[in-house]
Image (cartoon, rainbow, N blue to C red):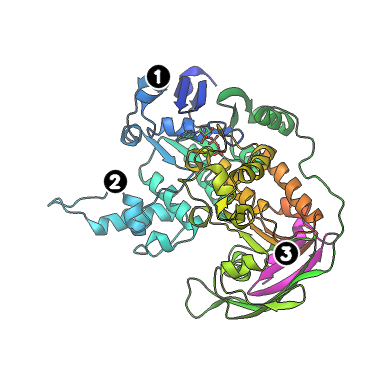
Amino acid sequence: MRAENSVLTVKKMTKRFQGTTALKEVSMELFNQEILAIMGENGAGKSTLMKILSGLYPGSETEGSIFLHGEEVLFESPIDSENMGIAMIYQELNLELDLSVTENICLGRLPLNKVGLIDWQKAEVIAVEALERLNLTLDMAATVRNLSPSMQQLICIARALVRNPSILILDEPTSVLTSSETDMLMEIINHLKEQGMACIYISHKLDEVYKLCDRIVILRDGYYISQYLKQEGYDSERIIEDMIGRKLNVMYPSIEKTIGEEVLRIEELKVPHTSAYGKDIIEDVSFNLHRGEILGLCGLVGSGRSETINAIFGSIPRTNGKIIIEGKEVNINSTRDAMRNGVGLLTEDRKKNGFIGTMSISHNMTLTILEKIKKLFLIDRKKESEKARYFFEKLSIKAPGLETLISSLSGGNQQKVILSKWLLTDLKILMLDEPTRGIDVGSKSEIYKIINNLAKEGVSIIVISSEISELLAICDRFVVLGHGVVQTELSKEDASEMAILRASSNT
Ligand SMILES: Nc1ncnc2c1ncn2[C@@H]1O[C@H](COP(=O)(O)OP(=O)(O)OP(=O)(O)O)[C@@H](O)[C@H]1O
Ligand SMILES: [Mg+2]
């Protein structure tokens, strides 16, 4: 690739925040019709660099320069960057939750009619067309709040495409997408590339990046580290080493442990659909869980995996079903009941249920164990920070200190704090919905170690994950849901990606 093919050049970009320098003299280029991956650990500076390119962080508050097609540009706001043909899909969904699908897609550029009023008919046509490019049909008047996270993500993508950008930036677009939605997005990006667009793509999923991207640029601790070209073949070992600054010996640690007696039994669970009134997403589900066991709960999206564990946690109602813990039927009708019975849940929707942005890392981590560290009526701050420090270090959370506000952390580091909160509790039964979403490879392997250790200490664990290879490596047994019932149960020996997928899509 020659310099004259460059559509975007960044020179010596530095960005300082209070207490952190997120980018340190980073230079990079994006070429014509190229799909470029930016990779690196949580907190490496990926999103910061993209927010500078989208104008969210004004040029006057950075050191360094940006060139578009060889001309230097200065972005003071997202509008400047948008007008120059750059569209960005942020890591955090940025939709107006109380507005409709049409309004969100056309936000900021609603078409006007001759007398200067908003032309709603035209707006809807534009929005429908944008969704059609993504093979989607939706109720255009629906309020975005009521749509699933993956639908919301697709709406963000549709909104970006309406602008016909020449450069499209996607910051972890697939973390909430299903595998078929991901495949569709890849196809669309490849198609846009053929039509002349260039794209910057951020993801922690290596296989996705290898398949889609022509080149990989690696950042670490705010520095540019290296680049790799697809045509030379990607070498995972080197790429991971560049990202985490050391060799990653084992991705999936194995730990010797014994599985004990039955701890939890679910009988005839029935859970109503959260959106379709009068229908049940779970019709009749029974399974059990043993002491020290890690159970993988599998199934396609919409099979009711999350609903099952949310019903066990008391965060959504069930219309039927017994929950038996250590041989005794228990009454769980609220999350408080669940916690009192030793049951915890890391939810999938972290934004809604996950953390308090205005509180520090250590406060957020210890929210669930306040009772334990409470000394009379005061919180024992020393104990709080001891416990929090353990996970802060284990999961290498990137922040100036435990007192840093969680809202100033990178996406993946926020996830680590929320996960720590649950790993810190000593509950009997821990349910984890997508525990490694958005987390970098190095920390993922630490999380597997921690989950394994908890199981070894006798905690019983249920895991949901869209990464089947991850489940296969850490789970002792698998329950596959489909059509509201248990399709099959597989032992570790019988389980394989094929077996799980086949059982999941049993029609
Ligand atoms: N508003 C802010 N105030 C203070 N520090 C910040 C702010 N935004 C980001 N940072 C810090 O800058 C660094 C880089 O963050 P950035 O969000 O760019 O990471 P990232 O590579 O996108 O990580 P992830 O994979 O977790 O999304 C982190 O150490 C983060 O804590
Ligand atoms: Mg990020």
| Residue 314 point in image, percent of width and height | 58, 70
Q: Tell me the element at label 2.
A: loop
| Residue 311 point in image, percent of width and height | 60, 71
Residue at image mark 3: 502
Farthest residue, direction left: 115
**Alpha-carbon neighbours of circle 3 within 10 Å: few (<14), some, or many (≥20)?**
some
Earlier residue among tags 2 and 1: 1
Indicate whether 78 appears above or below 21: below
Q: Quadrant of residue 42?
A: top right
Is label 2 in contact with label 1 (beta carbons under 8 Å)? Answer: no
Q: Tell me the element at label 1.
A: loop
Of tags 3 and 2, the one toward the viewer is 2
Residue kind at label 1, given as amino acid type: Gly
Quadrant in which the N terminus appears: top right
Residue kind at label 3, given as amino acid type: Arg
* Residue range (magenta): 480-507
Indicate whether 326 appears above or below 187: below
| Residue 467 point in image, percent of width and height | 67, 52
Residue at image mark 2: 108
Asked whether the viewer can see residue 145, the reply is yes
Residue kind at label 2, given as amino acid type: Gly
Observer-nearest residue: 174 or 223?
223
Real-space Cα distance between discs 2 and 1? 28 Å
Is label 1 in contact with label 3 (beta carbons under 8 Å)? Answer: no
Residue at image mark 1: 70
**Alpha-carbon neighbours of circle 2 within 10 Å: few (<14), some, or many (≥20)?**
few
Observer-nearest residue: 137 or 25?
25
